[in-house]
Amino acid sequence: MKQIRIVFFLFPKTHLLDLSGPAQVFYEANQISGQQHFQIVFAGADGTIRTEQGPVFTHITCPDELALEKGDFVCVPGFDFLSFTKGELDEAICNQKAWFRQQHKKGVCIGSICSGALALARMGLLDQVQCTTHWKCLHYAQSNFPKARFLNNRLYVMDKEIFTSAGMTAGIDMALALVDKWCSPLLAAKVAQEMVINVRRAETKDQQNIFLDFDNHFNAEVYRAQEILANRLDARFTVGDLAKMMNLSVRHLARLFKRHTGHTIQAYRDRLRLQHGEQLLLNTEMFVKEIAVACGYESSRQFVRLWKKEKGMGPEGWRRGLTAHYSQSPPHPPSSPVS
């Protein structure tokens, strides 16, 4: 995996939590994996940035010193909303507009935490892009940036390689989702556990994640079994192989796994595979037969049967329905005026 540079671009009056929470996620991902998946950089137009809470960042990187590549990530943490509405940040934001647009044009991912989305909207980067921001900023954002598709009731949104999150701690949720996307769901689960995040929140409230099962127990042997299963979806890897790797009998491992997760090993494995299939349906143009193989099934019929049981429809119908949903411009329901 290519090392991804994570650039936190700081504007004046940046909020500390918007910056520190997501930065900690990427730091922990490096520490836990033992690999430098991410290079964390703090950048800004000025060498010194005073945060809204008082601490000052000095000797931060000038954007012209960065030679970013496709797949790197530039993220704008939130800043004081009132100062933005008064126009106090306009000059700083407009001065960086050309640089941000240049980065996105060459394939660098762009993101924001909380009110940071307003900076991206001011630059025109959110035009015709589904996005979100802190609930307190939503009415202002929808009124002042009508070309952007600001969504209500979303923790984070990923659209057209632009990733935006709602207020403060939602930046942690989005960062975990990016570790999931760029590395593995398993590593994201480990980071969440290390940071004592009891529940990883998905972007919408009705979504669930099989890897939340890591939060439900602390049995080392079952944890290791889950780790192995997550990395061995292929059909030829059997439960017997798993037990052998762990120096346990199949019967003992099966009982241990069921006791601590509430699932049989096969049921858990099917859920892993279906979740992997969901990501492939969402993010690739692979055929269902190809996805079935990638998920570890020897035949697409088995994959389709399990998918229908889980989702109530076939994978192709599910994909078409989701594509149609996201291709429509979301409504902008009225919300309370910003105080």
Image (cartoon, rainbow, N blue to C red):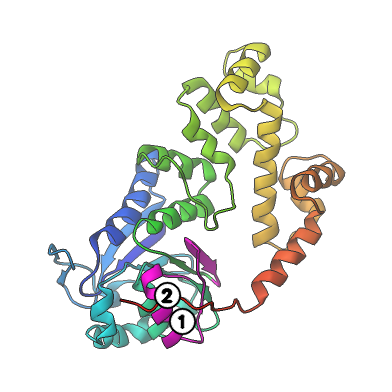
Segment tinted magenta in the rendering: 132-160
Measuring from the top left, give residue 265's x and y in whole percent: 67, 26
State yes or no: residue 262 in magenta: no
Query: How would you rate the neighbour count of disc 2 (Cα within 10 Å): few for under 14, some for 14-19, many for 20 or more?
Result: many
Do callouts 1 and 2 mark residues in contact (Cβ within 8 Å)?
A: yes
Question: Residue at the location (42% across, 78% down)?
Answer: 139
Query: Residue tagged by mark 2?
Result: 138
Measuring from the top left, give residue 56's x and y in whole percent: 13, 65
Question: Residue at the location (48% across, 56% down)?
Answer: 178
Which residue ends up furthest to the right in the rendered image? Answer: 301
Measuring from the top left, give residue 256's x and y in whole percent: 58, 17
Q: Quadrant of the C terminus?
A: bottom left
Measuring from the top left, give residue 80's x and y in whole percent: 25, 73
Specify the amino acid type for callout 1: Gln
The circle drawn on residue 142 is: 1
142 vs 30: above or below: below
For residue 33, say whether it is visible.
no
98 vs 117: above or below: below
Specify the amino acid type for callout 2: Leu
Structural distance between the alpha carbons of marks 1 and 2: 6 Å
Dividing the picture into quadrants, the one containing residue 257 is top right
Question: Residue at the location (75% across, 65% down)?
Answer: 321
